[in-house]
Amino acid sequence: MTLSECKFDGKKAIVRVDFNVPLKEGKITDDTRIRGAVPTLKHILEGGGALIIMSHMGKPKGKVKPELSLGQIKDAVAQALGVEEVQFAPDCAKAQEQAAALKPGEVLLLENLRYYPEEEGKPVGIDKEDPAYEAAKKEMKARQKDFAKTLASYADCYVMDAFGTAHRKHASTAVIADYFDADHKMLGFLMEKEVKAVDAVLSDIKRPFVAIMGGSKVSSKIGIIENLLGKVDKLILCGGMTYTFSKAHGGEIGQSIVEMDKLDVALGVEELAKKNGVELVLAPDAVCTDGLDFATMSVKPGAAVEVHDAREIPASLEGVDAGPVAREKFANAIKGAKTILWNGPAGVFECDEFCEGSRAIGDAIAEATAEGAFSLIGGGDSVACVTKFGLTDKVSYISTGGGALLEAIEGKVLPGVAAIKG
């Protein structure tokens, strides 16, 4: 069943969204995630249905934390949906009466799902090494099923529209689907777009296919990199992880971030790229400094800012961005691409002095997209990059999911998708 096919007239739909929005003094600072869910939610209301919205916020780890209450955003949700009021259930496990009383066109927002440890389904207060852990885990899984069954009892239909949590087998993202038959569970519009975008990159590949992977650590991206090396024509590696590659070749990297226990992994990536005929693109030079203030994301007065060979960085400096030669090399590698995937910046882009490497990548992707390439931008930092550089409407698709997108790219099955599609 698809959302477009389902008849919601007179029915109640419980929808898992990702309303984990940033708050400052109780005010939403970025409502992108709310706006992303609006088409699905409005479709249900306009079809004569009643809405029960559920989401998590932050990481309360099974405890009630008022600063993470979804009650803070109910008025913003009402405004986004164009309804007079969004009702609020202060206990998502005891909302039976409120759900039952809902009339067509009405909306009920449940409290933070993660106030309950059953949502994530992990034993609380016990180490994995503890002999009693397995028994506690089994008990918690049973409680998770009960929690999911309770949530399911509120509605006639279940809609999964939270791609950002689709890689988690939580009560509200996957387990709940067991309590609805195939005609009464479906993906929301946002999820459908996300799944299609991933399929376009990994299944329906138009070549040349260029992937850009950034970030600070090789270890956090190795599974994704290895999977991509079996699919791409060119792989650009940038950001902090590249200093591990420089060090693996005996380079001097000064104070730059490095994983000394992953030098062999870096060399293995290079060998795999060569074996698969993939052009591996690394930065030959780097912008370096001795005065980056991470707290304020600014350069300290009087600090050195210099360009050096990526394997000849002075002992007192750290690499913080791709150098001018690297930027040109990246742009040339992207030029002419027909499929592009970007995850992770080329440097400390939050600091204006060190964002030029990421800007060069973003501009090159925008140019390739204008010439017919399909470009998928994913991961919080990459999304922040295209937003900062004013490129959001110049790329094909911006994913709302960080971890979910990475696991999909890595070739893993997403529980939140599998629960619907089977």
Image (spheres, rainbow, N blue to C red):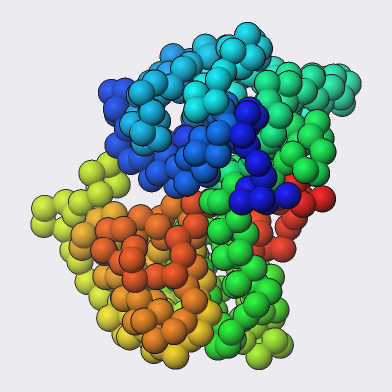
In the figure, is residue 101 to the left or right of 150?
Answer: left
**In this view of the protein, can residue 409 be seen by the observer?**
yes
Residue 261 x, y percent position in the rendering: 62, 59
Q: Is residue 352 above or below residue 135?
A: below
Q: Is residue 170 above or below residue 351?
A: above
In the figure, is residue 105 to the left or right of 77?
Answer: right
Residue placed at 22% from the left, 71% from the top?
306
Residue 101 x, y percent position in the rendering: 59, 13
Residue placed at 49% from the left, 57% from the top?
399
Residue placed at 25% from the left, 49% from the top?
297
**In this view of the protein, can residue 226 be seen by the observer?**
no
Residue 82 x, y percent position in the rendering: 36, 33
Residue placed at 55% from the left, 88% from the top?
208
Number of marks: 0
Depth check, front residue: 402 or 245: 402
In the figure, is residue 204 to the left or right of 31?
Answer: right
Residue 46 x, y percent position in the rendering: 50, 39
Q: Is residue 110 above or below residue 21?
A: above
Q: In this view, does 19 lie above or below 311?
A: above
Depth check, front residue: 225 or 206: 206
In the figure, is residue 379 to the left or right of 296?
Answer: right
Q: Give residue 117's quadrant in the image.
A: top right
